[in-house]
Amino acid sequence: MEAAPKPRTVQRNPPDDAQQHAARFAALGHEARVRIVRSLLQAHPDGRVAGEIQQQLDIPTSTLSHHLDALRREGLVTQQREGRYLRYRAGTQALRALLDFLYAECCGGANPIIQIGAAPRQTSTPRG
């Protein structure tokens, strides 16, 4: 007697990098959140306690908390309790992953080392 055929298992593709990064970009899709991340990068690696961020950026406490939670969910900031205070730091690994994702296909992949902030090459245009 032959064994019954095994049922086919459908293998689902792991989440696409683009999906993960789209969620991170969405978290950065508010001016206040971009300002928060920049502030934390300025204070890297020490970071800032929530009150320092609030004072520096003049964001109401409840609004700041909402924005920090959105950024933390996507790994763009980290949080550490220090007694009564919460210290926030830039999630540099997630931020680097965003940059790497954006530049992965840059220049046809010919140059894996990209100097961010470098001036573009000037091309001369014929004057006629």
Image (cartoon, rainbow, N blue to C red):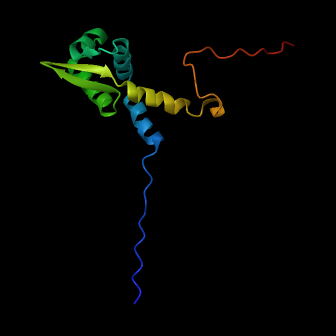
x and y percentages locating residue 12 in the rendered image: 43, 56
* Visible residue check, residue 29: no
State left or right for residue 106 relative to residue 35. Answer: right
Reply above or below: 20 against 60.
below
Residue extending furthest left?
84
Q: Residue 110 lies in what quarter of the image?
A: top right
Indicate left or right for 11 with 108 as reference: left
Of 41 and 26, nearer the camera is 41
Q: Residue at x 41, y 66 (%)?
A: 9
Q: Residue at x 54, y 19 (%)?
A: 116
Position of residue 10 measured from the top left corner of the image (x, y, whole percent): 43, 63
Residue lying farthest bottom?
1
Residue 16 visible in the shown view: yes
Residue at 39% from the left image edge and 30% from the top image edge: 94
Measuring from the top left, give residue 88's x and y in whole percent: 27, 20
Q: Is residue 6 above or below residue 117?
A: below
Front-lying residue, 89 or 67: 89
Q: Residue furthest front?
A: 1
Can you say which quadrant of the picture contains the N terminus? bottom left
Quarter of the image with the C terminus is top right
Q: Give the residue drawn at x 38%, y 24%.
A: 92
Q: Find residue 33 and report its image quarter.
A: top left
Q: Residue furthest right?
A: 128
Side of 93 relative to 120 (left or right): left
Note whether 22 is above or below 49 in the view shown: below
Residue 21 x/y as whole percent: 44, 36
Q: Relative to the observer, which residue lies in front, 117 or 29?
A: 117
- In the image, 108 versus 111, the foreground residue is 111
Q: Quadrant of residue 105?
A: top right
